[in-house]
Amino acid sequence: MTVDVQTTRERFEESLADLEVPVTRTEPTALESALEEIVREPAIGTPLEFEAVSLPDWIDDAPTPATLEAATTSVTSASFGIADYGSVVLPARPDGSEQVSLFPELHVPVLRESDLVPDMPTAIDRLGPVLRDGGSAILATGPSATADMGALVRGAHGPKAVHVVLLGDGETDE
Amino acid sequence: MSDAGGRRSKAAHIRRLLETEGDAVEENTIGFNRGRYESVADLEDYEELKSEARAIKEDAIERLPALIDELTATVEENGGTVYLADDAADANRYIREVASEQDADRLVKSKSMTTEELEVNEALEADGVDVVETDLGEWVLQVADEAPSHIVAPAIHRSEVDIARLFNERFDPEEPLETAEELTAFARERLGGLIREADVGMTGANFITADSGTIALVTSEGNARKSAVVPDTHVAVAGVEKIVPSVEDLSPFIELIGRSGTGQDITSYISLLTPPVESPVVDVNEPDVAFADRDDDREFHLVLIDNGRMAMREDDQLRETLYCIRCSACANSCANFQSVGGHAFGGETYSGGIATGWEAGVHGYDSAAEFNDLCTGCSRCVNQCPVEIDIPWINTVVRDRLNRGGDEGQFEFLVEGLTPDEEPGGIDLQKRLFGNYETLAKLGSATAPVSNWLADAGPARTVLERVAGVDSRRELPAFKRETLRDWYESRGPRIDAADAEREVVLYPDTYTNHVDVDRGKAAVRVLEALDVRVRIPAVPESGRAPLSQGMIDTADERASRVYAALAEHIDAGRDVVVIEPSDLAMFRREYEKLLPEASFDRLREGSYEVLEYVYGLLENGTDADALGGTDAEVAYHSHCQQRTLGLEPYTTTVLETAGYDVLESDVECCGMAGSFGYKTEYYELSVDVGDRLREQFTTPAARDRIVAASGTSCEDQLGSLLERDAVHPVELLDPRRRSGR
Ligand code: SF4
């Protein structure tokens, strides 16, 4: 059966497809061009937490309340992803990454393929020490949504759309 | 509810809701219910997850005082404050103080049923604080000045058109709003502005972890995140029962809560906030200061609410309520709730099946009494609850306690001789009448057909309706002069003990014995066709009738007598075969509460639903030929309690083996639910619930089929809804029927 040989990444991508969330795989060196395809300006972001990878300079990485309100897209790093659910784990940091991921219409979480975990128990085990250390995080799955106005609508108080960027390890594919 | 006037006004209230809110509630709850079935089907270890969640809650409530201490220490160490409030007034006083210290003009809130319980909005508004609900559904209700009709989706009783009309009237936008999309965009815009200028943010909590002081919030809109992080002060309000020991305990709940509620595998946001959070304040007064350059001093207050919960913890029957994670599965899977929603099926704050426990515990028995009757004990919610709470049992216990607290019955003298129960004098006459159905049935058969003529005569029906609330629109069951046992005694067994494959005791339930004797005879013939020797001894009523009226002592006494009557048969190797699923469910489920464990186990293991038994015989090699030879088409409605026990596949399989083409209904309940549909105040609701079944059985694919149902109430309900007679499946296998005699 294909399920048996399905990798964690394939499972993650399949979960995102079920959620109708697009995903782009890219190597760190090609991140900028990948973002050019996805991002609608004005764009803000917070510094990516990965070594040797940074946001292109046309994304404002020192947002303020004013730019937060004005931005159309935000790009932030996700600590890890949960394959079974297509969730990304967004940390709350002093640089405002949590709010930045929430306000703009389109959120682009960037995460490393090596940071995918298969399921919820593994994800929560990984969060245990972080939370006990005073940290906070959001398990975000797809865009914000509501059915309170009589029909399902994407984009309630949070983003209308999410586009996940999955970073390879910088070596050859597969 | 012991007088005719009270019944009339209750009926009128229900009728109004059926007309105004019923359609929207039905569409939404049935959507959630279907979503839940689909979503949990994807979970390989669904049952294990439920047991795990249950175990965590049991342990947490057991250790609650210690966990409160641990959590308090953790939150304080993190830099927050914990206040343990005794009751609503105490909590509100503290929250008002926090608001006044902050000089708060505006407080923004995310959805929280616990704050509804406290009525904190009113308390703050009295101090001049502008309280804004930011959950879109809650905001609709705030604008409309209404109470939630559902614990998760508070405005499901309102349609898109309804909300558009409300907003257009209230806000008079330049372009009138129409679609859900436009309404959402409008609300987002408007609420976004209000959140930006808020001084305090208030949230509830779905779970709180004692080891880290983390507030877990399960939401989809993103408003809880905004409410918690935009202002510099966060107040979280939560019942003490929300505490779990550690972060790792969250996992099963996260996997279960969205699926169980609205049928989503997971909601958009599971926020795990450990306040005071590191996220910077979004300060409108400093719009150009980069977040990274701020140095905020956030304030966090956790207000833990007792308000009756610690007493519930001491109460052996109500304690289970504290395990509830308020997912709403018990409401969405409830046939009555699907018709009327929380404005009828709810008390001061909470709604749905478990609300009885919550209301009794936090607001008192008067509030629970308002809607407790709406739980018919159909048990469809039992397997849906992610923490395995026996919700119908809690309803039964509260009903029993209400019976005991009731006023002296007005018409006591009328029923004294008819009601040899164990109940106190004050119990409502209607309940007493239905609870003692067995005595009525005995008398009815003994005096049939005169009893039937009398019962059906106009004046008698009028009195019965006025005094006991038995609706005259219902046909009463006609008692047979010759009971099943009489018939069998004169006929005798047709299988010799020496030739018999097995020997069984056919349980003569009250209805089969006195009213639908034909299905009993059919069962005998079917069993004999499979070489089973049948006995029909005298066995008392199972206790189902009194239990459904909340008469636990009477049911308890019945259970003992039933066990005494059956134990020797079981020991002699005879299987107990039961036709009526509601009685079998007593033996297999409710007797756990009424009998010693060993007795319960013995009866549970030794008793079978009749078609389950036939299935077992066929599986063990009995020749199915005796049953075969038809290709007729059947529309089959299983019984609610039969489905909870997972037994309906046996019936469909056996019918198919016999050659029938079976179409099965998928409604949760027929709406009759024993005596429920006979009661004047609930007659219309019962018909509305039944209508969903009627629709399924009048489609082109179903309307010409033979109608079969496993329960007596379902047979009666179907008979009157469809104006076609319904039969028990065992009658379809009856050799006599198949030979055309
Ligand atoms: S009782 Fe169970 S099913 Fe009902 S709301 Fe609570 S957790 Fe959900």
Image (cartoon, coloured by chain):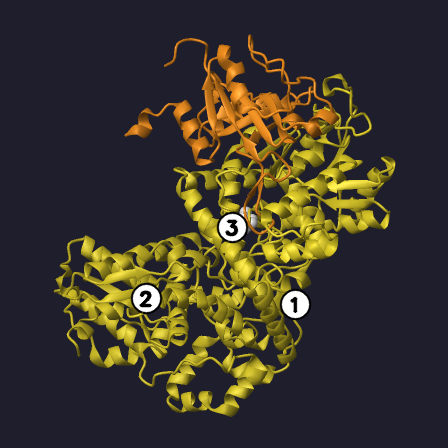
Chain colours: A orange, B yellow
Mark 3: amino acid: Ala
For marks 2 and 3, the one nearer the N-term is 3
In the image, the residue with mark 2 has its CB under 8 Å from the nearest atom of ligand 1? no
Between the C-alphas of marks 1 and 3, the distance is 30 Å
**Which of the numbered marks, if any, corresponds to residue B700?**
2
The reply to whether dot 1 and dot 3 touch (C-beta < 8 Å) is no
Question: Which subunit holds the residue at mark 2?
Answer: B
Mark 2: amino acid: Pro
Quarter of the image containing the N terminus of chain B?
bottom right
**Which of the numbered marks, if any, corresponds to residue B370?**
none
* Residue bearing the label numbered 3: B329
Mark 1: amino acid: Gly
Foreground label between 2 and 1: 2
Q: Looking at the image, which is closer to me, B28 or B645?
A: B28
Quarter of the image containing the C terminus of chain B?
bottom left
Q: Is residue B362 visible?
A: yes
- Tell me residue B197's x, y (percent): 79, 36
Between the C-alphas of marks 2 and 3, the distance is 32 Å
- Tell me residue A26's x, y (percent): 46, 16
Image height of B476 relative to B200, above or below:
below
Within-10-Å neighbours for mark 3: few <14, some 14–19, many 20+: many
- Left or right: B353 in relation to B121: left
Secondary-structure class at tag 2: loop
- Tell me residue A16's x, y (percent): 46, 31
In the image, the residue with mark 3 has its CB under 8 Å from the nearest atom of ligand 1? yes
